[in-house]
Amino acid sequence: MDNKTQSAYRKEKQQLDQIAAEITKQRQVLENYPRYSGDNVTEQVLESIREEKRQSLVIASKEPYFARMDFQENEKESHSYYIGKVGVAHGDSQDSLVVDWRAPVASMFYAFTGPKRTSIMYLLMASSKGI
């Protein structure tokens, strides 16, 4: 493996480790939060939201993402999007770490047919299993 490939691999591994750590952190916070089982409707709705998030994070922990899409338009800076079965945002900043495959931005991944003059997209199918 040449140095460029090794460097790209290390960068992707670092990104995967960062996302995995954030998923683990969020799962721990939600698992330590007491589950509500009372009659307060507002609390029931909030618990439902927390439970849905718990289930999403379980899915994300098994396979955080399955692809990376790099998008660059008209000489602007390139931006990478990681696409997964569920979206994951950073707990503090709410910046997107993984985009849900159903999100509008992910449609570029599915519609990609090859490089064009105004936009260049490189796709990397990533196996990210086994956190």
Image (tube, grey):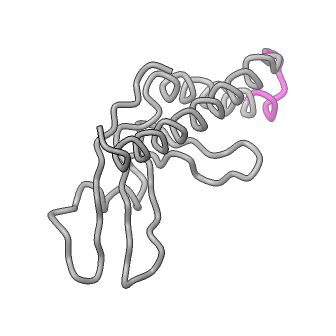
Image location of residue 111, percent across then percent down: 22, 61
**Looking at the image, is 128 positioned above or below residue 14?**
above
Residue visible at 77% across and 25% down?
Answer: 29
Image location of residue 113, percent across then percent down: 15, 63
Q: Which residue occupies the extreme front position in the image? A: 2
**Looking at the image, is 10 positioned above or below residue 24?**
below
Question: Would residue 76 be found to the left or right of residue 122 on screen?
Answer: right
Q: Which residue occupies the extreme left position in the image? A: 113
- In which quarter of the view is residue 46 placed? top right
State how many labels appear: 0
Rendered-image quadrant of the N terminus: top left
**Looking at the image, is 52 positioned above or below residue 115?**
above
**Looking at the image, is 16 positioned above or below residue 103?**
above
Residue visible at 31% across and 62% down?
Answer: 108
**Magenta region: which residues?**
37-44
Between 63 and 58, the residue placed more toward the observer is: 63
Residue visible at 75% across and 27% down?
Answer: 44
Image location of residue 120, percent across then percent down: 28, 71
Would you say residue 46 sits in the magenta stretch?
no
Residue visible at 48% across and 36% down?
Answer: 13
- In which quarter of the view is residue 25 placed? top right
Between 125 and 101, the residue placed more toward the observer is: 125
Between 41 and 55, the residue placed more toward the observer is: 55
Would you say residue 41 sits in the magenta stretch?
yes
